[in-house]
Image (cartoon, rainbow, N blue to C red):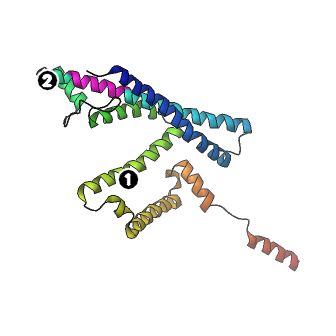
Amino acid sequence: MINLVDELLAVCGALVGGARYGLKIRLPHALVMTVLFHNDLSKKEKLRYIFKLGFEHAANLASFATIYKASLVSLKWCSRRLRLAKDDKRLVMLLCKYIVDGPSPGVVAPTSMAGQPERAYHALLAGATGGYVVWGKYSSVNYQIVLYLTSRILIGLSKRCWEKFSPIEYKNMLQHPKTYSLLSAAVWGVVMVLFEETPHVLHRSLKTSMDEIYRYQISSFSSHSTIDDDKGEV
């Protein structure tokens, strides 16, 4: 059926890779953000906070990667077992096939490598399962990752649609001066309207960064001049 040893190694590799990557990405980011925006904390509290964020990111990535890979193994095993019982017309068996392989089974890849999905539908199910179990618990780290993925997904979907329906290469289209200029204009126009009109709807880190830029006030030179002038007149 499937090579359980190779599949198990793929699951373990995802566990280690997720933890390693989470620490590598989160620790430098947490260090910079804590130094810049958490001056109210002591040095000991800052270190504790940095390592807390780093551990959370690493643990969540490792957990998600493990659940994802383990789910793929389970779905692959179930799919192949159900395929062997293809002549079984029982309602329960048909329901199981529908759940495991989806409404449109499509092309089967029974020789898929260890740790890889048998079908694209399996990646959807496994990803959704891990997303619900791990990233479904709200925290600042989880929320940032969801926001990061959302923007990448929108770009990825637009690229996929463009490649499917347009003869022009997506990269060339995006790098076209006029096209990219319009994209930048739309993005910055919308974000500035949100910041000026309803800043509370923006993510806290984005709002904090924009406050640093657009709400920063230098000590009024004119007010000092007026005081000096008043003293002079007195």
Q: Is residue 9 left or right of residue 31?
A: left
Q: Is mark 1 on a helix, strand or loop?
A: helix
Residue 75 belongs to magenta span: yes
State the image quarter where residue 49 is shown: top right
For mark 2, what is the residue?
86
Is any part of residue 60 visible from this angle?
no
Residue at the image point whose x is 40% and y is 31% from the top: 130
Indicate left or right for 137 with 53 as reference.
left
Dot 2 crowding, Cα within 10 Å, few <14, some 14–19, many 20+: few
Q: Nearer the viewer, residue 49 or 7?
A: 7
Q: Residue at x 61, y 33 (%)?
A: 52
The amino acid type, in three-letter code, at marker 2 is Lys
Distance from disc 2 to disc 1, alpha carbons, whole Å, reads 39 Å
Find the magenta span and give its range. 70-81
| Residue 143 belongs to magenta span | no
Which quadrant would the N terminus be assigned to in this image?
top left
The x and y percentages for residue 208 are 59, 52
Residue type, numbered disc 1: Ile
Q: Nearer the viewer, residue 196 or 71?
A: 71
Q: Which of 188 and 59 is in front in this view?
A: 59
Q: Residue 155 carries which label?
A: 1
**Which callout, 2 or 1, points at the residue further toward the start of the chain?**
2
Q: Which residue is drawn at 63% across and 38% down?
A: 50
On the image, the x and y values in percent for residue 147 come to 46, 46
The residue shown at (62%, 34%) is 51
Q: Is the magenta stretch mostly helix, strand or loop?
A: helix
Which quadrant is home to the C terminus?
bottom right
